[in-house]
Amino acid sequence: MTRSELIAKIALKNPNLTTKDVEKIVHVILQSMVDALAEGKRIEFRGFGAFSVRTRTPRTAKNPKTLSLVHVEERHVIHFKTGRELHRLLNA
């Protein structure tokens, strides 16, 4: 599902809201999520899942083309863990 599909679905279920209002709401929600993750906070939606930031330690990797060693810096990645209800639905 894309952002525009999400906006269209919410607007369809809420005829009292204009599409522009729904766009603003979705934008504020997603921006709040981005800001929280940027601060290293965890975001949890009961039944759906949780987003968190994990740190990958610096390491030495091999370039598969040249087989030379390359240093990979520390980096932060987003991790998603499904909630129980979503996990059950996906694996029913």
Image (cartoon, rainbow, N blue to C red):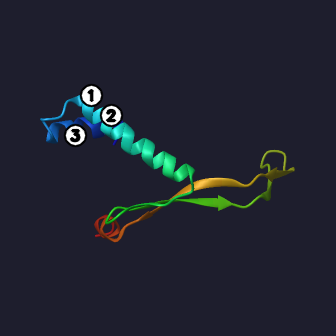
Tell me if mark 3 has few (under 14), some (14-19) or many (20+) residues whose alpha carbon lies within 10 angstroms of its own. Answer: few
Task: Please state, as top left, top right, bottom left or bottom right, where the N terminus lies in the image.
Answer: top left
Single out the mark in the foreground, 2 or 3. 2
Task: Compute the Cα span from label 1 to label 3.
Answer: 13 Å
Residue at left offset 26%, top offset 32% = 21
Label 1: state its secondary structure: helix
Q: Nearer the viewer, residue 66 or 53?
A: 53
Residue at left offset 38%, top offset 37% = 27
**Is there CB contact under 8 Å for labels 1 and 3?**
no
Where residue 24 is drawn, which disc sits there?
Answer: 2
Report x, y in % for residue 63: 79, 49
Q: Nearer the viewer, residue 90 or 41?
A: 41
Q: Can you name the residue that lies furthest to the right here?
A: 68
- Say which quarter of the image contains residue 66: top right
Task: Please state, as top left, top right, bottom left or bottom right, where the C terminus lies in the image.
Answer: bottom left
Q: Which residue is mark 3?
A: 9
Whether residue 38 can be seen here: yes
In the image, residue 76 above or below residue 19: below
Q: Which numbered disc flags the more N-terminal residue, 2 or 3? A: 3
Whether residue 2 can be seen here: no
Report x, y in % for residue 45: 35, 61
For badge 2, the amino acid type reads Lys
**Is there CB contact under 8 Å for labels 2 and 3?**
no
Residue at left offset 56%, top offset 52% = 39
For badge 3, the amino acid type reads Lys
Residue at left offset 15%, top offset 42% = 13
Report x, y in % for residue 36: 49, 52
Q: Which residue is mark 1?
A: 20
**Is there CB contact under 8 Å for labels 2 and 1?**
yes
Label 3: state its secondary structure: helix
Single out the mark in the foreground, 1 or 3. 1
